[in-house]
Image: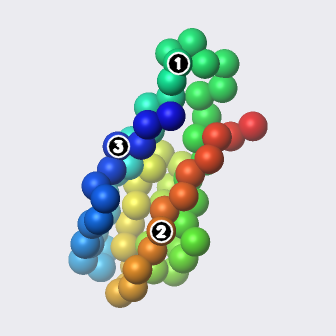
């Protein structure tokens, strides 16, 4: 899996950025990705990879394959 995203991003409160995942190989049987934020009160991420900032702070976005 390849995640297309900047190494470091600064967002203003209310701004958002889209993360993109490319699953390889093309014929993979499970192409599901689960996005989550360790600190959703600062920045949340939906299951389409859209990250939205809510207040000042630092966050780490995580992803994993869905099962």
- First in sequence, mark 1 or 3: give its number: 3
Find residue 37 and report its horizontal and vertical position in percent: 54, 66
* Residue linked to disc 3: 4
Q: For mark 2, does the 10 Å Cα neighbourhood hold few (<14), some (14 to 19), or many (20 or more) residues?
A: few
Q: Specify the color scheme.
A: rainbow
- What element does badge 2 sit on? loop
- What element does badge 3 sit on? strand
Q: Quadrant of residue 30?
A: top right
* Quadrant including the C terminus: top right
44 relative to 29, above or below: below
Q: Residue sitting at 66 percent across and 19 percent down?
A: 29
| CA distance separating discs 1 and 3 | 16 Å
| CA distance separating discs 2 and 3 | 15 Å
Contact, mark 1 vs mark 3 (Cβ under 8 Å): no
* Residue linked to disc 1: 25
Q: Is residue 28 something that shows in the picture?
A: yes
Q: Residue sitting at 45 percent across and 80 percent down?
A: 42
- What element does badge 1 sit on? loop
- Furthest residue to the right? 67
């Amino acid at each position: 899996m390849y995640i297309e995203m900047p190494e470091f991003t600064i967002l203003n409160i209310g701004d958002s950025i889209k993360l993109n995942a490319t699953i390889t190989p093309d014929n993979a049987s499970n192409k599901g990705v689960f996005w989550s934020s360790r600190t959703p009160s600062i920045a949340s991420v939906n299951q389409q990879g859209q990250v939205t900032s809510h207040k000042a702070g630092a966050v780490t976005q995580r992803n994993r394959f869905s099962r």
